[in-house]
Image (tube, rainbow, N blue to C red):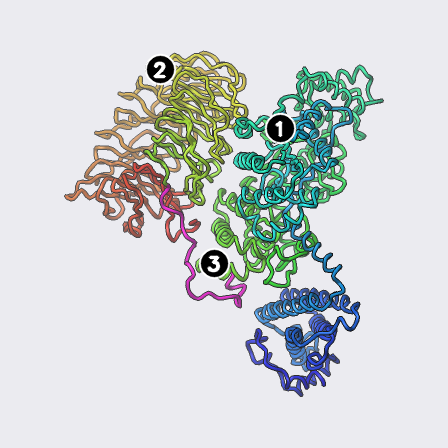
Amino acid sequence: MSARKSDKARKPHTGISLSGSSSFARGSPSRREKLYDTTNIGLDVVANIAEGSDILAPLKAACRTTKSILEVIQATENNREEWNNLTERLKGYMSALEEQLSVFETYPPEHRAVDKAFISPLIGYIEFLEDMHDVVVNMKQKRSHSKLGFLKAFTKVKLDAGEILKFSQGIDDRHKQFMGALSLFTALHVQDIERDAKAILKKLDESAILQLPLASFVASSVHTTCLEGTRQAVLQTISHWAEDDVSDKPIFWLCDIAGSGKSTVAMSAAALWKAEKTLGGQFFFSMSNSEASSTEKFCSTMARELAHHMPDLAPHIVEAVTQNPAIMRSSFEEQFRTLITGPLRQRQQRVILTIDAIDECRSGSQRKELLDTLATATQEIANLKIFITSRPDPVIEAVLQPLSKKAKLQDRLHDANQPDNINDIAVFVTQSLDGVLSHEKMQRLVAKANGLFIWASTACRMLTSKTNLSSSDHIYDRLVSMNQPGAIDDVYDLVFERTEPEQYAVMRAMLALLLAAFEPLTVHDLDDLLKHSGVHGSADALVRNLGSVLAEDPATNLIQFRHPTLVEYLRRRSIAPKGDHTNKLYIDVANAHGQIASWCLKRLKSRNEGLRFNICRIESSFYLNRQISDLERRISEFIPRKLRYASFHWPFHLSETIDTWRRTLKNEVQHVTKVPHVLCWIEILSITGGVPRAIAGLRAITRYGEDNRDRIDDIRRFMMTFSVPIQDSAPHIYISALPFTPRESIMHREGLKKYANRLNVTLGLEGLYPGLPRTLQGHEGQVNAVAISPDGWRIVSGSSDKTIRLWDADTGQPWGEPLQGHTYLINTLATVGCESGQPLGEPLHGHEDAVISIAFSPDSSQIVSGSHDSTVRLWDADTGTQLGPPLRGHKGSVSAVAFSPDGLRVISGSSDKMIRLWDTKTGQTLEDPFEGHGLLVSAVAFSPDGSRIVSSSYDRTIRLWDADAGHPLGEPLRGHEGAVNAVVFSPDGTRIVSCSSDNTIRIWDADTGEQLGEPLRGHDSLVKAVAFSPDGMRIVSGSKDKTIRLWNSNSGQPLGEQAQGHESSVNAIAVSPDGSRIASGSGDKTIRMWDLRLGRPWGKPLSGHEDSVNAIAFSPDGSRIVSSSGDQLGSWDYTIRVWNAETCQPLGELFRGQKEAINAIAFSPDGSRIVAGASDTMIRLWNVDTGLMVGEPLPGHEDSVKAVAFSPDGSRIISGSEDKTIRLTAIPGTRGVD
């Protein structure tokens, strides 16, 4: 029976339609015969298959039909992406079929018998292939008479992409059913391959473990074991601890300074325990590797280590992964309990986990969480021991120090008073430099090392380097001439000084790229990056010439920094020196980030090795990523390492570079973030587990400028909203995520155009993504101060409930525990940046009296607070954990605190008349207290470059201090005859302006401390505030005498006539965006404009309000002013007015609607709306052009609203109220609403 005859006998089968038009309908039998004759294709007969009993028949038929389809498609020379993807899919399926066929052909005939129970899905698959074959041949035949010739004509056929997608989906389903039937056949009928089945099962077990992500850092590529005969005393102490099964100290903490050899000791201990078969696993943190500097892959890596070192635990780990397939999306504690604690319960013998350099885990919250989890695990698993190394670290100290169940060895490795330390270094130096230096010279080097192994090892590599251009004697002379023994920075200076002058710039550029990279680069990657960036250098030459500090892993070709002290050294050199730095080691990391961002975007756009649809050739959407047994092989084969790096890190490089680079790369970013490219990018993230990092990266980008911000925000919300299906299955990006995006989202609109035939949701879609919660609740007392972190991701609030709270600016959730410790109300906070509006954890408790001063560190990682309880406290801004004990030393209220620009120091001023400088790492005081003031220190501040400190006091003086040396710079700045109320540096840091209760303003030379000119007199009462104009040319002052005055900051002379005119108190002041004018609102019911340059009134008073003007603001473009007042209009209808800032005339009518006083007012960033906060607890929005209220009043507060402001993108309002809450309110219908 022929294939054609079998058509009549076929039962109709359900499936996808091959065409939506008649042109692809099945032809008559006679027509189909001609088509088959034309292409000379012979197909097996379905009826014969149905009647047959050999499993080989359907396999051969499927192979032949698939091959025939491929031949027709490939003959067309059609390069359409859809056809190419389908072709690749068919090739993959045919390969699977042929592989199965070759296996079954080895079975004896009696084992190939198949009954009718299995034949139905096999026939369905072949029928589908025949249908598909008919369509492509039909297309070929229809063009056969074209004058263009067959091939040219066929390439003109335009088969809708949707039809091709239907082919793909249909063949996925049939192939899955076909292969499922074959699997069932194998399981039930092939009894003789039981041994092979067990082998397959073992492979499946292994694949389950291989699904667990592995941190890429390999400790052996950087660290070695101790030289034989060294560190014996320390290793013996550790060994005794490990062997003592009755000890109540399951944790051993080796704590010492950087470069003392902790990692080398850890490697030696792990090697010993591995030989004894007690090593469960090891994890070496590294600040130079993004995966090894966080705990994201700690549990999965340690689980794979357990399975490797203790194979008897592998089945339990497999079971844990199988039963918890989404475990990597669980909390860290849950991951540890499932993957490590659970399997360890099945083992009775001793298990030791080695964890090195925990201090190099960058997140303080992750360090604390890891240590808490480890401590809990040792209480639950009696046979578990944990060996930890770290530098001294406040977070680690806070967790481990109180634990009684730990052994601690601190400062043992570098103590020069320990004879064995010096002897060990002597052994190392002798073996390394034998035949290079004399015994006497080697002994001098040992002494210079001062017990620091990293100093000795770096020096030895320098002296033995084969690329040295200088003699070993010259290098030796430089080493021993260093002033401070054991100062590793001096050694690194010498390493880089030896570079040829003409190559110095190239070396700096290459080091900057290595430092900026979030993962170690291979030699090939760095060369490719250098070529792309136009840097004429060689990665191989760099490693060879800097072999004393850089190493290339021979197995992976990754370039590694030999020690974290080098990373820290280079980061310190990334701060631009003053003046010409051509011949200085300045590492321009910001520019390097731009170069790498450009390289990453090029990789993503590459036609051959860049983004593409279904990059890993996943055959079916029925399987989740974790169910694809060979996924790791596919990733390795189809996603080049450079593409993986680019996909993971391009957003962070873009966020870390400078505005010039961001502007340059604007078009490239727009290209990558458009559909379909962005979906292909998300595919890679789904398959490689990079979705969480990408979400964080996209958030980081939005902190800078407006370029592509709407699009970036939309992609981030898409990934956050659909993170579960996206992370579970790459195909479901298109199937389950894209169709359900909000109607007005960019992804929805672009996706609808690109994938017209995808699932169409007609009802129930949201218009926009949901907004933020309106209320940030948590404080139990009045909120007195709020501030936003410099990175814009957190809000900090201080309250009369004596706590500080952190809130996630994206989600509105609390971040960590409250910063507790204050025992009185908190009055002030420093300015920091935000995105979401939730308290980050619990309030921060700890102070025992009112918190009266607070500030964020420049990198937003820490908070410093000062209190009436006389203490300064440091807090981890991520966790809310107090970092170390309170900083004690003051004997009075700490009235002022500030971080240095580099975040390494804190300055505090107190009512005890003292100023103290603190080290933020150790919590120790630096230098003795700065003494000199005779009364309370009212303010302290660092100069813009961090080199000086200025302080003011109620003792009527101002003092300047050297921030590095800690001594006063000259004599006190005397002249004021009353308390100094405020001091500020000029924008360029060259001058200081102060104001006092003596009614004067004074200008001081910030370098010499000399008063510049005479006091600025004119006010009739105490001067409460002063400020420089943006250009530093003018000073504006406000006084209790109801006047505002303008001054020339160079001459100290008043500008024009006294800016007096108000007849009552001045309630509000606003400076125009360009710094040319001032607007003031007064209790005399008027607003006055002042020319900042001339010091004269600008036009006539703005009259119209009928009560005190309480708040005023300029529009962003300076063309309008908004004011609010408590106007008495019969019913106490409080009003808002908008004025033309040029003509001083009102614009339109009064904005009415308020029934109580308006306390705060602000323009939106685009100037189109006004927000007002009032005593009636409401927030209202107004359209500036129409004067109409926008929507309903925004409720939520339970007491008077005292402060309002728009977010920089205009999508949100932040408000503060007497109800003790801060609220972040999303404005419906605006872009970027979260």
Closer to the camera, 263 or 462? 263
| Residue 326: percent from left, percent from top | 56, 51
Image side of residue 197 versus residue 1176, left or right: right
Residue at mark 3: 741
Magenta stretch, residue numbers: 750-776
Closer to the camera, 900 or 242? 242
Picture quadrant of residue 893: top left
- Say which label, 3 or 1, has the lower sequence index: 1
Residue at mark 1: 247
Name the residue type under label 2.
Answer: His
Residues under labels 2 and 3: Cα distance?
A: 64 Å
| Residue 285: percent from left, percent from top | 63, 36
* Picture disc at residue 1215: none
Regarding residue 484, the answer to whether it shows in the image is yes
Name the residue type under label 3.
Answer: Thr
| Outermost residue toward the right in this view | 435
- Say which label, 2 or 1, has the lower sequence index: 1
| Residue 1012: percent from left, percent from top | 41, 17
Tell me the element at label 2: loop
Image side of residue 52 versus residue 1052, left or right: right
Asked if the stretch drawn in magenta spans residue 152, the answer is no
The answer to whether mark 2 and mark 3 are in CB contact below 8 A is no
